[in-house]
Amino acid sequence: MARDERSVTPQSEDFSAWYNDVVFRAELVDRGPVRGSMVIRPYGYRIWELLQADLDGRIKATGHQNAYFPLLIPQSYMQREAEHIEGFAPELFTVTHAGGKELEEPLVIRPTSETIIGEMMAKWISSHRDLPLLLNQWANVLRWEMRPRMFLRTSEFLWQEGHTAHATAVDATAETMLALGFYQDLSVEIAALATVPGEKTPRERFAGAERTFTIEAMMRDGRALQAATSHFMGTKFAAAFGITYTGENGTAELCHTTSWGMSTRMVGGVIMTHGDDKGLVLPPALAPYQVVIVPIGRGEQTEATLSAATELAATLQHAGIRTHVDGRPQLSPGFKFNDWEMRGVPIRLELGPRELAARTALMSRRLSYRQPEAIPLDAAPELLAAELAAFQAMLARRAADFRDDHTVVVNSWPEFAAAVAVGWALALHCGEQACEDEIKAETTATPRCIPLAGEPEQGTCIRCGKHSAYGKRLIFARAY
Ligand SMILES: [Zn+2]
């Protein structure tokens, strides 16, 4: 079949070209005028809104409140926590002029908001009765990006950042794990990703954190994507910003803080987990349109099928199914079928004169568009709700199977190298940075996480043969 201008590069030919074709042709994004910037188009933004709505519900249901903090941060704030500024310095955007004059103190555009929120927490917390303080903000952040990629790495991106303060390390650790749980549940239940929750090794920690936890998802090219992170800060930021409370015995104590975030990068994870050579495949929970109806008919039939399609759409909308009628008169049904297939719509319905006469519609699922089946119009809402639920579950299962099929327990270097060429390796490692560097230089794989669910195990390092660290196997993979 000749490749027309709407088709995409096959994944097996060039995964990264495939990704670019999909994000632009499915009209998820466009390039912004500034290098590394991204315009999120309505179809892409709707996916983000659906992710956002689900996560916001989880955040609020556990007692957190949304607030909003300024975009501009005094440069001096960033410098108060040494590791934090060291980690973020290469990515900062700095504002030196305003109103035509040079500023006395430069302002930093937030790369993350620990510092400004820490400053406010110090002001708002005085006694143990003010704790825990559970805040979240939905915002944009800017981090200078040398090798931009739509959704995955852009200089400006959207995210939520949770920031909390607690009396004890135990409470703050429990909060860190609670937030990680939001991300893991959202990934599996809503995005249908194959994620593994785990802890980052010291070198991969967030700048200024004592412990960093992550969910790592496997993409269809076998690479890992860090889909969200949750950090336990201990008392580091509390010490830098004076976040203290008066304990029950009257002494001033440092708070223990956390932060946790999920960004528009998650949309990239959805694309690279489910998509295929035909284009995007969207889990119903995140599909802007769960069902698209294509009315078919020529001449005087046109009006009858279009009005039946509109009526069916209203019924489905009423039943809570996001439905769209593609009534574009100038385009052929074949073009529309290809278009919605490429844009990842879970279910397509065809409504022609023959179907109308029989009170049916022809239903096709995104992964088997070539095998339509007739469904009775009267039962369409119940049938389609069940189909969408089944499609969502199938995608989650397919992603988990793919991850499991491409994850190998390895005990020798050749096994390791073979595993990370196509997927993930579960390996013991000595924990030394020089050894990690060697592994990266030779295979481009890095330690992604120490899985929470991993069994305790000791032995020798996969690379250098020294005694293993961490007490468990790590996931190594090439990563985005
Ligand atoms: Zn080693």
Image (cartoon, rainbow, N blue to C red):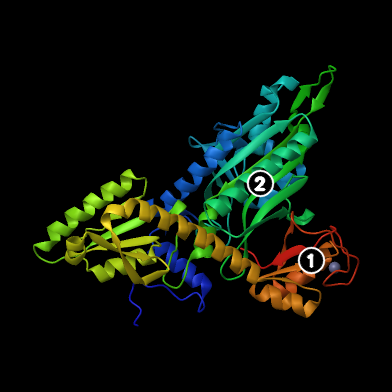
Name which residue lies at 82% across and 71% down.
462
Q: Work out whether mark 2 precedes mark 1 in sequence or the reverse, and give the earlier one.
A: 2
Instruction: Reply above or below: 202 against 337.
Output: above
Residue 436 is marked as 1
Name which residue lies at 74% across and 42% down.
232
- Residue 176 x %, y %: 70, 42
Q: Nearer the viewer, residue 446 or 296?
A: 296
Is residue 103 visible in this depiction of the protein?
no
Q: Of all residues shown, which one is farthest toward the right? A: 467
Classify residue 193 by image quadrant: bottom right
Answer with left or right where residue 265 lies relative to residue 10: right
Q: Nearer the viewer, residue 266 or 105?
A: 266
Q: Secondary structure at mark 1?
A: helix
Kind of residue at disc 2: Leu
Residue 445 is marked as none
Answer with left or right where residue 431 lies relative to residue 373: right
Q: In the rendered view of the protein, which quadrant contains the N terminus?
A: bottom left
Q: Nearer the viewer, residue 82 or 406?
A: 406
Can you tell me which quadrant of the image ligand 1 is in? bottom right
- Residue 250 x %, y %: 83, 16
Is residue 368 visible in this depiction of the protein?
yes
Instruction: Indicate if the residue with disc 1 has its beta carbon within 8 Å of ligand 1.
Output: yes
Q: In the rendered view of the protein, which quadrant contains the C terminus?
A: bottom right
Residue designated by label 2 = 180
Kind of residue at disc 1: Glu
